[in-house]
Every structure is written in structure tokens, then in C-alpha cells.
């Protein structure tokens, strides 16, 4: 009895985690709800047949024997402890924790639950701390197992964030790819990364348990050094009216009639939102391509981004060849609605990141109608719908992306030029046109009748208008343009045929002069 009490005194000085390891080494697993005294009694019963704990007078350290017992099968103890953690999370296998299984399989009667509840709570807190320490140790071991000592692979791409906080570096366009590098939450928070950031660094290949490579080091962010910077948030930048004209007329190319006509009928300011409205087949894509070519020719400080959705593959190739200094993102008509949405959102987020760094960007989108149709198909039927089975989100999200166009007082601008189909009234195109009333600073309308008769650009001279042009044009130029527009509209009348004749007369005057300045004289 005296030896038993001495062993009990020795074990009382150990914490709950050490007692669990000793019991595991002896072949038993205490219940997660077992009290400390119950675990000690279990160890004493298990060691009664010979695994004695040496008293203090027999050994230099009273804990030497139990430690030796645990270390004799250290791997088994660690495995049992880890398994114990899993069992703790599942609430344990015992019903009441009053009966424990000994090493020989016989039930061992536990001491009655008469202990102090405060002491039990303290033991539980100690055990919780021990479990946390063991989990951290296993995580460190797992990290060491996943460490990679090969040569790093250079990687460059744009960051796409997930709702869970981590992200992927899209290395081939805007859509997911098996070569995309995983970016952990820690890196994203450390450098304040945002969706659309252009990143460069090194990665390691995916191991057997992973699908994608993983980012190892981050070397540059948006072309600059990879360091924590206090950059502004796009939504916090101060939007202001356009103060400078977006010059489209090309002095070297007098045959660029489309650009000259837009400058005269509906001039565009840097940082404005521009809508190109027209029925299908009226030449909206061709007009947008002409605008892209003019911007690249006349505005080298403005970065051009093309976004063409739900297009024919051959049209995508032609448009891509026209963009020389900027970039283009496109999807073909055979891709899914989710891919259209992903491409559009990533491209707009990239444009925002450029504006945050002080760049001026011109984003040309064809079309808002295709984007709304993609959102409508991607959204569930649980949302509020307009007439014609149109989801409310299908209208709101294109408006949100289009609303990113703005001039900012700090530095930089985002000129948003987007096309929209003007067919229908109750269907999605009609609803979309109604929702975008008043959203644009400049509207360029295309005429169905002129397009059908082969008159291009089929610009509706009477409907096209530029808001606030007096803010970025001088008074004399505004007056001259107004007089010219009145002369263009003379004889147009109310009939479609008369409007087409007026357009033909205006285009003839443009071809007979080498510049708009000559025409205005």
C-alpha cells in the first residue's frame, strides 16, 4: 500500500498529457472525459504486474521510470496521442467515462466522481492546451514532410482570390488551369494582395496530394518590388468629371472616318463611361475596333484593354491582331456562362489595380448584353426576377462593372467603352437598355437602316450625344461642333430614309476634307 501511494504521489506531479502518454505506452487509452485521478489509478493498475514506478529513494528522479516507459515505445505513444485527439473531437467512444479498459481487456473500476468541479475544469483546460501543442507539432512535422528541395520554377500570372481567403495565380489568361500556382492566405494578407494583381515569383510542383503547384516566393507585384505598400483602394478614390479629351482623329490616316465622326458627333472624355447602342448586325464590334486603333495611335499613355465576350473565334483573332500595345481577353460562343463571367470580372479587376497605381486605362467591352446573359444563366432561379425570367443580378452585375469607369482626382483614370444591344422591349436586351439610362456620359447610337443599306459607320447623328463636353472642350470648339451637328441634321427629317441620306452627306463631307479642323473652318 505504501509503494502504491508513493507511485500515486509521483504521478500526481505530472500533467494530464503526460499521463495519457504513459497510459498509451502501457497499452490503454483513457477516455477523453476521464479525470486525472482516474488516469492515475489506471496506470497504477496496469503497472501492478511489474512495470513499477521507482520511488524517490530508489532513483535520482521520481519521474524517471514513467518517462522511460513512455520513451520505450515513443512512436506508439505519439500515434496513440494523435489518435486520442481525433477521438476527442468526436466526443470519445465511452458513454459515461466511468469504466476504462485495461491493458488485458478487463474493465477497471474508476473512482467515483466526487472531485472538485473547478479542478476538473482546470484539468480540461490543461488538456486542451496540450492538444493544441500536439496539433502544432504535427503541423510542423507535416510542413517538414511537404518541404521541397528542388529547383524553383519561375511563375507569372494574375491573382484570383477565393471566398475562403486563399487564391490562385492564373498563368494562362483568366480561367483556371492545372498550371496555376496556389497562393496561401498568409502571403495574401502579408502583402495586401488583391484580385487582379500581376505577380511574379517562384513555385514548386504539386506533390501527389495536390492538384496545383504552390507559390514559394513572391518577387514582384504589378511590376514593382514585392513589399508591403499602402496603396489606395479603387473604391476609395475620388471620382471627378473628365477634364481631357480622348483624341480619336488620326492625322496620319485621313481615311479613319469612324474616329473623326465620333470626335465630331459624340466626343469622349478621358475617364468617361461610353455606351455604344445598336441592334444586332449594325457594326458595333467594328466601331469598337476603330476606337481601339485610334486610342493606341493617339494616346500612348493610355493602356488599352479589350474584353470581347461570346464571340465567334475568327472575330476574336481579328480583334486580337488590332491590339498591338495593350491586351485582350475574350471568350467564344461555345464557352460556358461561368467562363464569360470569370473572364469579365478578372479583366475589370485588373483594370482597377492599374488605376490604383496611377495608370490611365481604356477598357473596351463587347458586349454588356452578352455579359448580362451570362450572369442570367449562371445565377440560380432563387433570386428576384424581372419579366421574361430575367434575374435581377443579371442586370445589377453588368451595371456594377460598367460603373467602374471614372476619372479620379488622385491619379489615373478608367475609360469604359461598352456596347449594348438595343433590340427588344420586355426581353433581357430591352430591360438592360432601360436600366442603363443615365449611366453613361456619352452615348453613340447606331442606325439599323443605315447598316442594312451598307452605310458605315452607321452612326445615328440625331441620337448620339456627349454629356458635359464643355468640361473638356473649349467654348469655341463646342460652338463650332454644335453648328456642324445642326448642318448634319438638316434634311434628316423623321423618316429612316432621310436620316440615312443625312449620314451619307456627313460622311461625304468628311472624305472631302483631310481633318476635322478643316471641316470646322
Image (spheres, rainbow, N blue to C red):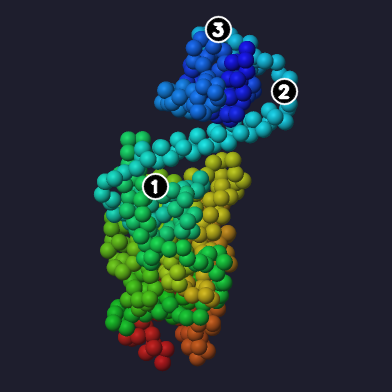
5 or 463, which lies in front? Answer: 5
> On the image, numbered disc 1 is attached to which residue?
182
Q: CA distance from mark 2 to mark 3?
A: 25 Å
CB of mark 3 within 8 Å of CB of mark 1? no
149 or 230, which lies in front? Answer: 149
Q: Earlier in the sequence, mark 2 or mark 3?
A: 3
Residue 148 locus on image (x, y percent): 31, 44
The local crowd at label 2, few if under 14, some if 14 to 19, many if 20 or more residues have their Cα within 10 Å, is few
What residue is drawn where x is 51% and y is 16%?
52
Q: Earlier in the sequence, mark 1 or mark 2?
A: 2
Secondary structure under tag 3 reads: loop
Quarter of the image for residue 507 reads bottom left
What residue is drawn where x is 34% and y is 73%?
296
> On the image, numbered disc 2 is attached to which residue?
115
Q: CA distance from mark 1 to mark 2?
A: 51 Å
The local crowd at label 3, few if under 14, some if 14 to 19, many if 20 or more residues have their Cα within 10 Å, is few
> On the image, numbered disc 3 is attached to which residue?
106
Residue 164 locus on image (x, y percent): 51, 45
What residue is drawn where x is 61% and y is 34%?
126
Quarter of the image for residue 93 reads top right
Examine the rendered structure and indicate whether residue 82 appears above or below residue 308.
Answer: above
What residue is drawn where x is 49% and y is 12%?
50
Q: CA distance from mark 3 to mark 1?
A: 51 Å
464 or 240, which lies in front? Answer: 240
Q: Residue furthest front?
A: 57
Q: Residue furthest left?
A: 151
Amino acid at each position: 500500500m505504501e509503494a502504491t501511494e508513493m507511485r500515486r504521489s509521483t504521478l500526481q506531479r505530472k500533467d494530464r498529457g503526460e499521463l495519457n502518454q504513459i497510459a498509451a505506452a502501457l497499452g490503454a487509452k483513457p477516455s477523453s472525459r476521464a479525470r486525472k485521478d482516474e488516469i492515475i489509478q489506471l496506470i497504477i493498475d496496469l503497472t501492478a504486474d511489474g512495470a513499477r514506478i521507482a520511488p524517490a529513494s530508489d532513483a535520482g528522479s521520481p519521474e524517471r521510470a514513467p518517462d522511460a516507459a513512455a520513451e520505450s515505445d515513443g512512436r506508439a505513444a505519439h500515434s496513440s496521442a494523435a489518435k486520442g485527439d481525433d477521438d476527442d473531437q468526436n466526443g470519445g467512444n465511452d458513454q459515461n467515462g466511468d469504466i476504462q479498459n485495461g491493458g488485458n481487456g478487463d474493465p477497471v473500476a474508476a473512482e467515483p466522481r466526487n472531485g472538485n468541479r473547478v479542478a476538473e475544469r482546470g484539468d480540461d483546460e490543461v488538456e486542451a492546451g496540450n492538444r493544441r501543442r500536439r496539433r502544432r507539432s504535427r503541423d510542423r512535422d507535416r510542413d517538414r514532410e511537404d518541404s521541397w528541395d528542388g529547383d524553383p520554377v519561375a511563375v507569372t500570372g494574375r491573382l484570383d482570390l477565393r471566398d475562403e481567403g486563399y487564391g490562385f495565380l492564373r498563368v494562362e489568361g483568366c480561367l483556371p488551369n492545372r498550371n496555376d500556382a496556389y497562393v496561401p492566405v498568409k502571403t495574401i494578407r502579408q502583402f495586401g494582395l488583391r484580385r487582379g494583381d500581376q505577380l511574379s515569383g517562384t513555385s514548386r510542383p504539386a506533390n501527389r496530394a495536390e492538384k496545383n503547384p504552390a507559390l514559394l516566393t513572391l518577387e514582384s507585384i504589378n511590376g514593382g518590388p514585392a513589399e508591403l505598400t499602402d496603396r489606395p483602394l479603387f473604391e476609395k478614390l475620388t471620382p471627378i468629371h473628365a477634364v481631357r479629351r480622348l483624341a480619336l482623329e488620326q492625322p496620319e490616316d485621313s481615311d479613319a472616318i469612324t474616329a473623326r465622326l465620333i470626335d465630331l458627333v459624340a466626343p469622349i472624355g478621358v475617364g468617361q463611361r461610353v455606351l455604344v447602342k445598336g441592334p444586332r448586325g449594325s457594326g458595333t464590334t467594328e466601331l469598337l475596333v476603330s476606337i481601339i486603333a485610334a486610342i493606341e495611335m493617339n494616346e500612348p499613355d493610355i493602356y488599352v484593354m479589350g474584353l470581347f465576350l461570346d464571340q465567334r473565334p475568327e472575330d476574336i483573332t481579328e480583334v486580337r491582331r488590332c491590339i498591338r500595345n495593350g491586351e485582350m481577353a475574350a471568350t467564344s460562343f461555345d464557352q460556358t456562362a461561368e467562363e464569360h463571367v470569370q473572364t469579365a470580372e478578372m479583366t475589370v479587376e485588373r483594370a482597377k489595380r492599374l488605376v490604383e497605381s496611377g495608370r490611365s486605362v481604356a477598357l473596351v467591352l463587347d458586349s454588356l448584353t452578352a455579359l448580362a446573359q451570362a450572369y442570367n444563366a449562371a445565377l440560380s432561379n432563387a433570386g428576384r426576377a424581372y419579366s421574361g425570367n430575367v434575374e435581377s443580378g443579371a442586370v445589377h452585375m453588368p451595371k456594377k462593372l460598367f460603373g467602374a469607369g471614372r476619372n479620379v482626382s488622385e491619379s489615373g483614370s478608367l475609360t469604359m467603352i461598352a456596347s449594348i444591344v438595343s433590340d427588344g422591349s420586355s426581353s433581357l436586351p430591352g430591360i438592360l437598355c432601360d436600366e442603363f439610362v443615365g449611366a453613361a456620359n456619352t452615348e453613340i447610337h447606331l442606325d439599323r437602316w443605315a447598316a442594312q443599306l451598307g452605310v458605315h459607320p452607321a452612326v445615328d447623328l440625331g441620337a448620339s450625344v456627349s454629356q458635359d463636353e464643355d468640361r473638356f472642350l473649349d467654348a469655341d470648339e463646342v460652338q463650332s461642333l454644335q453648328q456642324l451637328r445642326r448642318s448634319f441634321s438638316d434634311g434628316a427629317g423623321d423618316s429612316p430614309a432621310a436620316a440615312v441620306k443625312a449620314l451619307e452627306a456627313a460622311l461625304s463631307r468628311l472624305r472631302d476634307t483631310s481633318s476635322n479642323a478643316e471641316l470646322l473652318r
